[in-house]
Amino acid sequence: MTKFVKTGDDTPRLSLGTAAARQLATTTKTVPQMQGITPRWLLRMLPWVEVTGGTYRVNRRLSYAVADDRLVFSNIGAKVQVIPQELLKLPLLRGLSGDDEVIAALASQFTQAEYKAGDVIVEAGAPAEHVFLLAHGKARKLRAGPYGAPVTLDVLADGDHFGDQAVVESDDVWTFTVKATTPCTVLSLPQQVFEGLIARSATLRAQVERYRERLKKPQDKLGQAAIPLAAGHSGEPDIQGGYVDYELTPREYELSVAQTVLRVHTRVSDVFSDPMDQTEQQLRLTIEALRERQEHELINNRDFGLLHNADLKQRVHTRNGPPTPDDLDELLSRRRKSRFFLAHPRTIAAFGRECTRRGIYPTPIEVQGTPCMAWRGVPLLPCDKIPITEQRTSSILVLRTGQEDQGVIGLRRTGLPDEVEPGLSVRRMDVTDKAITNYLVSTYFSAALLIPDALGVLENVELGG
């Protein structure tokens, strides 16, 4: 006699149910999955150089051009002040030390002015008698073109400055016009006030003299010590001789480290490792997280990260806010052999919207078997490690890579004890009295910029809605 089994819908069951059948079946499982694993294009695209001694030195020709940087300001309400020590970022004052009172006095003499969009901050042909610091806003540096229309020479934004060279020269005039693109807050220092401080401070006076002497030395368009050359001559004229001088204090990059200690209970690894090795899976996911952190450091580390080590002359601002083909052309025009752009995925989407708005459809190219958006044949690769600010702005990087092209390179040390991947080791440490095995997971790395134009950054890119 057939016995019927009641099911949930009151329909008699004629066979064994799946819930009971699963008790005898083997479950097919995946390996542990993990969110946050990205393509890590920067790690894949950088050429890696072996650093056996732990330190990589970048030797360059001697340069008279002093390093430059953007200034930081403080405010109380609407009143803005430049932080005194920030003035040492100006080429004129770079290297000045031992006289904090003079720097504080100099900072206190700057006066604040507000400009509306479209206002002229300085006009070409007017006497150049002030140092200007742009505390907030965006402005354009303009010059009349050959056909009368204004030509944009540069875009200035928060922290930029101009006129510091003008105050050490007499009877000079502005060779360009600066016009506010957005409302701007500007601090200015009159030349007379600066000259008064020079007269009272021997330290400041000596600093200015050193700066003037540096300007007089023969140098090429990049600020490097000039090499005497002769060309186009005839007969037997005297040919000048010389030599190539080097920097006496070249920059050195010491390998950084990213580490963690993985803990695995021996009971887990001994008893629960079939069909998957528990220790192996724990290590796999830990290594993925460590590689993600490695790429984050290569972008954001203040000592060697690309965002913080780009030369000021290689940092540009968008003309209108969102990233446009014109902005990417500006980046490409400042270097040769650009290998790839690097941008946050949302920034790439914003660029795509601007292209669509103009009726431009960039041709995709294939990079390591993956189709990617490209501009002028240079792939635009995604990297979510590039930060997005609270104001929904971000940056786009463009890199020339490789030692042979004097580009950006990655630094690492391979051949480590217990190495499981190039430059990454997993070292078993000990078993504690709680039967927990500890594994030290380490990777040593850094990045080096061989010459300044190897890296460019488009800053303050608006992402829009």
Image (spheres, rainbow, N blue to C red):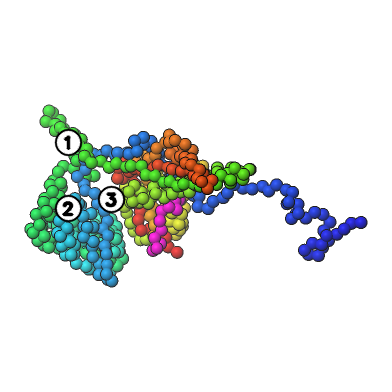
Amino acid on which the number 1 mark rests in the picture:
Pro
The residue at which mark 2 appears reads as 97
- Indicate left or right for 392 with 268 as reference: left
Q: CA distance from mark 3 to mark 2?
A: 25 Å
Magenta stretch encompasses residue 381: yes
Instruction: Please report the residue visible at 76 percent of the width from the left and 54 percent of the height from the top.
Output: 20
- Which of the 4 quarters of the picture holds residue 51? top left
Circle 1: element type: loop
View extreme (left): residue: 199
Query: Residue 400: x and y, percent?
Result: 36, 43
Amino acid on which the number 2 mark rests in the picture:
Ser
- Which of the 4 quarters of the picture holds residue 267? top right
| Mark 3 vs 2: CB contact within 8 A | no
Split into 4 quadrants, where in the image is the C terminus? bottom left
| Mark 2 vs 1: CB contact within 8 A | no
* 204 vs 69, nearest the viewer: 204
Circle 2: element type: loop
The residue at which mark 1 appears reads as 228
Residue 211 visible at all: yes
Q: Bin the neighbour count of mark 2 within 10 Å (Cα to Cα): few under 14, some 14-19, many 20 and up.
A: some
